[in-house]
Amino acid sequence: MATKTARPRRRQRPLGLAKKRTVRKHKQADPSGPTDEEFAALKTFKSARVLDAEGNEHEFSTDDDVLVVPSGKDPNTAHLLPDTENWVAKIRKIARRSDGEVWAKVEWYWSPQHVASIVKSFDLPSYAAYELFPDIDFQNYIPVESIVDTVKVIQYDDCDLEPPFIGPTTFFCRHVFRPKIKHVTPFSSKEVCSICQQPYNPDAAQRSPELLTMHFCPRETCQAAWHRQCLSTHPITKRPTCTDRKLSLLCSIPSVFLKSSVSPSASTSTSSPSLLSLLSKSEPAPPQSQPGTRKRRRLSEADALSLFGDLPPDLIQLASQPIVKPTFKPSGVGEEAPKRRKGKGKAPKEPRNVIHNVAGNITTVLKARVLINDVVRGITILPRDWRKKIGWDDDAIPSIIVDDDENDQCPPLLCPTCGEHI
Ligand SMILES: [Zn+2]
Ligand SMILES: [Zn+2]
């Protein structure tokens, strides 16, 4: 059931409504708004339909994330502001007073600036302009006429293996904020790089990708990310490895994706030994070794390519990239600006070839690795629409790297936890 009111947020105010209100966020309840007791006694609705100045109807529902006119801003021009200059809230309940006034009970999202004003130790430069911090302790009431528009807010876990695309003007959150105890809690226990203890800041990485790109290790023992700068100075980088970098990367698949393909005899305690074992040929160990031992032969990229048979080279190229954020445009594709998602805010200025994607290329790269694994192991044949199947359609191309220059320039970084290529 929806309730209907008029929304004076466009160029003129509908007749019959009181002067537009702004919202007193967090500080004190709007004196003209309902108390908890009054609101609890009101008739509630799942949604509210409101009219803008042009007579267009907009519907806001419970659980919608919405932009709200902030204190001190002109409510009639708030929709022209960048999204980051409006406030953001989640509607929890909608109720109507007997006089027709419609109020929404909302939870607030705090901006990094608001959090920094409360928590003195909060390191503002570590967080992105479009990052938000849901306040799980506090709710209050706003008139629905103060709602500017609905907006998308994505919950993002730094260790999620299949995160959605999060562009430069998409709100996202990866922490909750409890202002009463001045505490910011990340969704993920591995939110920060364990070497420098700093989180990933997509805005800063956009400006300095050569230092602040983060490399993610998807193996079960790790599933965390480290800054390229931190990895390049870590002692682990001096350790020799026995596998080809691209092959090692291609075979790094968390076993959660391999349920249908891991043989009963294969170990499930580490990431994808099955595909690497399948592709690596063993040969007798040198004479000085213990009798009967064998060692894994270092498999060159050319050897691996021959084993992959007729698989498309670009699928193999995609699967053998490091899992990184941000990502990079393919060579020769990058003259135009990356596709923008919905949102009115200005995107940060981008150096050429870097894509502002909060989640990086993990989703598409892991899907490519799983597909190759399944084809090589005979579980499936390569579908004709394999690009679509792994999410590598036109929209997604800017969100992943298929750039051998970048790949080749990337130092041979190793995971500080498991010692494998990342
Ligand atoms: Zn670091
Ligand atoms: Zn690792």
Image (cartoon, rainbow, N blue to C red):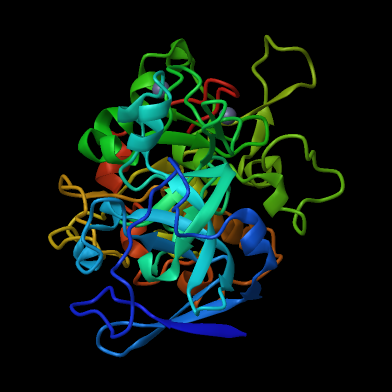
**Residue 194 % position (x, y):** 51, 20
Seen at 48% across and 74% down, the residue is 101
- Which of 26 and 372 lies nearest the eye of the viewer? 26
- Which of 312 and 8 lies nearest the eye of the viewer? 8
Above or below, 130 against 98 in this view is above
Above or below, 395 against 418 in this view is below
Q: Dividing the image into four equal quarters, which quarter contains ligand 1?
A: top left
**Residue 349 % position (x, y):** 16, 47
Seen at 27% across and 35% down, the residue is 204
- Which of 49 and 422 lies nearest the eye of the viewer? 49
Seen at 60% across and 56% down, the residue is 370
Q: Quadrant of residue 411?
A: top left
Q: Kindly give the residue lying farthest to the right in the view shown.
A: 264
- Which of 107 and 267 lies nearest the eye of the viewer? 107
Q: Kindly give the residue lying farthest to the bottom in the view shown.
A: 55
Q: From where the camera sits, is residue 108 visible?
A: yes
Residue 154 in the figure: left or right of residue 190: left
Quadrant of the rendering where the N terminus is positioned: bottom right
Q: Quadrant of residue 144?
A: bottom left
**Residue 332 % position (x, y):** 17, 58
Q: From where the camera sits, is residue 307 visible?
A: no
Residue 105 in the figure: left or right of residue 377: left
Seen at 41% across and 27% down, the residue is 118
